[in-house]
Amino acid sequence: KAGVTQTPRYLIKTRGQQVTLSCSPISGHRSVSWYQQTPGQGLQFLFEYFSETQRNKGNFPGRFSGRQFSNSRSEMNVSTLELGDSALYLCASSGQPGAYGYTFGSGTRLTVV
Amino acid sequence: GNSVTQMEGPVTLSEEAFLTINCTYTATGYPSLFWYVQYPGEGLQLLLKATKADDKGSNKGFEATYRKETTSFHLEKGSVQVSDSAVYFCALSDGSGGGADGLTFGKGTHLIIQP
């Protein structure tokens, strides 16, 4: 079956702009979570959605937001981009949140210039 | 809060050598534990997992045992190959199912296997 699909793979934006990233989970998976990966901070949890509801959120400013649609696809949005937002953004899906492990997509590489 | 500590490396070994990557954790509940692997330019792949104390996860020759008494989940492989070169992440998930912090990751260990 198809894996987790993230689009686009690469993105270059200018400081101050906003960006929307998309994630399509594995068919049947209802949990989608997002992570930011940077060389300095490593992998950091952004938020998790389950059945269109945000279950929890990591320690990121309000410029980072997300949503999940009825087909479980998820988007995350970053407004007023800063240079420090340059990172690999990873999406992961699971049948249920928590103990069962997550399948990750290949990520979206965002560069803010 | 939850945390995961692992050696960052790089760890350089010769082909067929024995591998150990140490991982210890701090958690308030009863977490599930995972090892993920990341190859260059790719996302994370689940390597193995263990959901309760004394469970042993295994896959592709890699093993790790959930040790609650030492709060550890060390990754081992008896004979590494060049194709094992990658970054390895130890992670935990809040075992209560609340998933309060999603997955908590260690900093990652860069493994380099030389022919």
Image: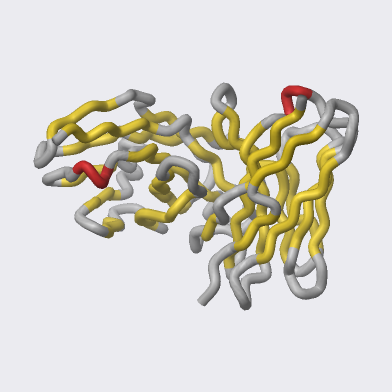
Q: Please tell me in which quadrant of the rendered image residue A41 appears.
A: top right
In this picture, is A59 found above or below B36?
A: above
Judge from the rendering whether residue B52 lies leftward or rightward of residue A46; answer left or right.
Answer: left
Viewer-side residue, A97 vs A26: A26
Which residue appears at 47% of the width and 30% of the height?
B107
Which residue appears at 44% of the width and 53% of the height?
B45
How does the figure colour the protein chain or chains?
secondary structure
Residue B111 image point, x, y percent: 30, 33
Viewer-side residue, B60 vs B2: B60
Which residue appears at 54% of the width and 41% of the height?
B104
Location of the C terminus of chain A (image quadrant): top right
Judge from the rendering whether residue B78 lies leftward or rightward of residue A4; answer left or right.
Answer: left
Q: Please tell me in which quadrant of the rendered image residue A68 appears.
A: bottom right
Judge from the rendering whether residue B17 lies leftward or rightward of residue B56; answer left or right.
Answer: left
Residue A79 image point, x, y percent: 88, 37
Q: Please tell me in which quadrant of the rendered image residue A61 appears.
A: top right
Judge from the rendering whether residue B41 lies leftward or rightward of residue A46; answer left or right.
Answer: left
Which residue appears at 59% of the width and 70% of the height?
A26
- Does the rendering let one see residue B54? yes
Residue A99 image point, x, y percent: 51, 59
In this picture, is B82 found above or below A8?
A: above
Residue B42 image point, x, y percent: 49, 47
